[in-house]
Amino acid sequence: MFDITSMLGNSNTNSNNSLGSFSFTDYAAIKNGSYGKLVKSYYGGTDKANYEAKAASAKSSDSAKTKASTEVDKTGLTQIKKDADELRASAEALNKDDLWKGADGKADTAKITSAVKDFADKYNKVIDQSSKVSSKEIAQDMSYMTGMTDTFSKVLGKIGITVGDDGKLSVDDEKLKKADTATLKTLFDGFGTYGSQIADKAGSIYRDADMSSTIYGSNATTTSALSSVYNQFV
C-alpha cells in the first residue's frame, strides 16, 4: 500500500525507486486504477450509483414543485374564468330591453337596482381573483377594464357607485334607488355603453384564462417540457 499524500504533494523522495517526488510504485497504482479509487475515498467522493440516485431525487423534487405550482395557477385561472363569465352575464342582463320597459312601458326600478348591485358584486370578484393569477394577457385585460371604470367614475357616482382606491365598486343603495333612469340607461343600456364594454372585456378575460389554463395543462406537461428545453440552454 502506498501513501496517497505522497502523490498529492507531500512525498518523501526514495532514491532507489523514484524520479524526483514521483515513484514507479505510484505510477503502477495509477495505471491499474487503484489511485483513482483512493482519491475518491480520500476526498469523500460518491460513486456513480449514489450520484445518480441523488440526481434522480432532485429531479423528482423539482418536478413535484413545478406540478404543485402549476396546479395552484390552474386553480386560480379556473376561478377567474367563472368570475369573468358571471360578470359578462351580469353586464349583458343590464342591456336587455325588458329591464327598461316593463308591462306599463316604464323601467322597473327595483329590478334595475338589483341588477346594478349584482353587476358591482361580480365586478369586484373579478378584481379580487385577478391578483391571484399570473397572466400577462389577463393583466392587460384588467388594466383596460379598470381604466374604463375610471373613465366613467363621475357618471357612476351620480347613480351611487363609488370607485375605491383598490378598484372595487361600492354601491349606495339609497342613492341608486333614486338614480335618474336616463343616466342608468346611458351607463348600461345599448352598444358602446360602460356596461357593454365591461361585458366585452369580461369575455376577453374568460378566453385568456381558458387559453392559459390549456397551456399549463392538468399535469404540468407543457410547463415541464418548456422548463426542460430552457434548462438545456442556461
Image (tube, rainbow, N blue to C red):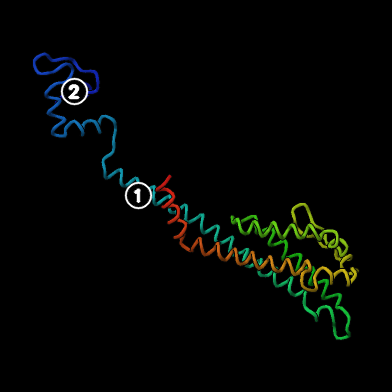
Query: Is the N terminus in the top left, top right, bottom left or bottom right quadrant?
Result: top left
Occupied quadrant, residue 132 = bottom right
Left or right: 26 as drawn, with respect to 205: left
Q: Which corner quadrant of the image does residue 209 belong to? A: bottom right
Q: Where residue 44 appears, x then y in whole percent? A: 29, 33
**Amino acid, disc 1:** Ala
Viewer-nearest residue: 79 or 222: 222
Residue at left offset 80%, top offset 70%: 188
Query: Percent from the top left, x then y, of residue 172?
Result: 85, 62
Vertical side of 56 occupied by 151: above or below? below
| Residue drawn at 80 percent across, 80 percent down | 97
The answer to which of marks 1 and 2 sits earlier in the sequence is 2
Q: Position of residue 108 (x, y in %)?
A: 85, 78
Q: Are marks 1 and 2 in contact (CB under 8 Å)?
A: no
| Mark 1 Cα-neighbour bin, 10 Å: few <14, some 14–19, many ≥20 | few
Q: Quadrant of residue 139?
A: bottom right
**Distance in Å between CA atoms under marks 1 and 2:** 36 Å
Is residue 176 or residue 187 the one in the foreground?
A: 187
Residue 122 image offset from top left, x and y in percent: 72, 66
Identify the residue at the far bottom of this view.
103
Query: Residue at the spot x=14%, y=26% of the render?
Result: 27
Residue at the limit of the structure toward the front, as seen here: 192
Location of residue 15 with respect to 230 vertically, above or below? above
| Secondary structure beneath label 2 | loop
Question: Under tag 1, what secondary structure?
Answer: helix
Q: Which mark is residue 79?
A: none
Classify 10 Å Cα crowding around label 2: few (below 14), some (14-19), many (20 and above).
few
Which part of the image, by quadrant, shows the C terminus? Answer: top left
- Residue matched to label 2: 3
- Which three-letter amino acid code belongs to the residue tagged 2? Asp
Q: Nearer the viewer, residue 168 or 234?
A: 234
The residue carrying mark 1 is 56
